[in-house]
Image (cartoon, rainbow, N blue to C red):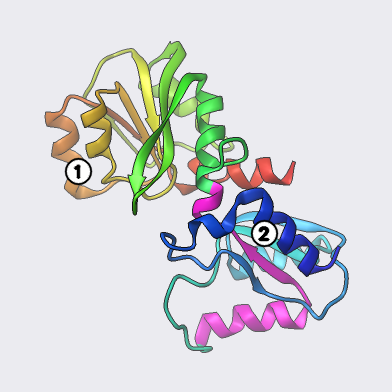
Amino acid sequence: MTTTDIDAYFRRLLKIEDWASCDSALNGLQVDNSGVPVCKIAFAVDASLETFERANAIGAGMLFVHHGLYWGHQIALTGNFRRRIKYLFDHDIALYAAHLPLDQHPELGNNAVLAEKLGMTALEPFGVYHGRTIGYKGTLTAPLTLDQAGERIAYKSRPAVALLPFGKNINTTCAVVSGGAAKEVEQALAEGVDLYITGESAHSIYHTVMEGKLNMLCGGHYATEVWGPQKLAE
């Protein structure tokens, strides 16, 4: 397929245009190739020189990432940024990115897959971000301890970035927002769930979680945002 064909496919599948008003990321084709057909796509969380090199090593003509190179402001073509762009040009690799559209997608998104891994049912939208809900809350079919929940979502058995064990010993309800959604813990407290799961923690929410008697699991970006790209690759 050409990059134009692939762009049209992903835009339709992920409803990319629906997120244009609330996502600072440049979703879609960020770097084009020379026009040759793409026969293999690599998938990763981040656009970095390492992922570019790995994509090239397996002969991929496109790299699809969750975190691209452009985030709502101008970037000078200098330093590491120039080296990244030059590598893509030199090896004729196209770069595609989908941020919030891949977080929220009800089947392929990071949060939908996290909910599936945790065994969550009766899912409802959760986690308002710039006026849109991007996560989910629901009931755990099998009650989980904080450690068990961490094991369910761990990527290659990597330990969580942070565990805040201030709630019940056994969790029966859960809310998930992948990535850097520490402040959305306020919404989890308001919803009255037992467990809140995101990627990163923050100093400012520690005592909020403690005083709210909530369990919070911060799995890291590579435990909470690797699943959407993998599901999309499938």
Residue neighbourhood size for the residue with mark 1, other residues' Cα within 10 Å, grouped as few (<14), some (14–19), many (≥20)? some
Q: Position of residue 42 (x, y in %)?
A: 73, 56
**Res 196 visible:** yes
Question: What secondary structure predominates along the stretch shown in magenta?
Answer: helix
- Amino acid at the residue labelled 1: Ile
Residue located at (86% from left, 62% from top): 1
| 135 over 91 or under it: above or below | above
Q: Position of residue 165 (x, y in %)?
A: 26, 26
Residue located at (48% from left, 65% from top): 25
Number of numbered discs present? 2
Q: Quadrant of residue 58?
A: bottom right
| 117 over 20 or under it: above or below | above
Q: Which residue is mark 1?
A: 205
Residue located at (72% from left, 71% from top): 94
Q: Nearer the viewer, residue 38 or 56?
A: 38
Earlier in the chain: of badge 1 and badge 2, it is 2
Q: For marks 1 and 2, give the CA distance.
A: 33 Å
Q: Nearer the viewer, residue 163 or 115?
A: 115
Q: Which residue is mark 2?
A: 64
Residue located at (57% from left, 45% from top): 226
Q: Does the magenta-highlighted stretch encompass residue 94?
A: yes
Q: Does the magenta-highlighted stretch encompass residue 163?
A: no
- Amino acid at the residue labelled 2: Phe
**Res 43 visible:** no
| 16 over 35 or under it: above or below | above
Q: In the image, 117: left or right of 64?
A: left
Magenta highlight range: 79-102
Residue neighbourhood size for the residue with mark 2, other residues' Cα within 10 Å, grouped as few (<14), some (14–19), many (≥20)? many
Q: In the image, 156: left or right of 169?
A: right
The residue tagged with tag 2: helix, strand or loop?
strand
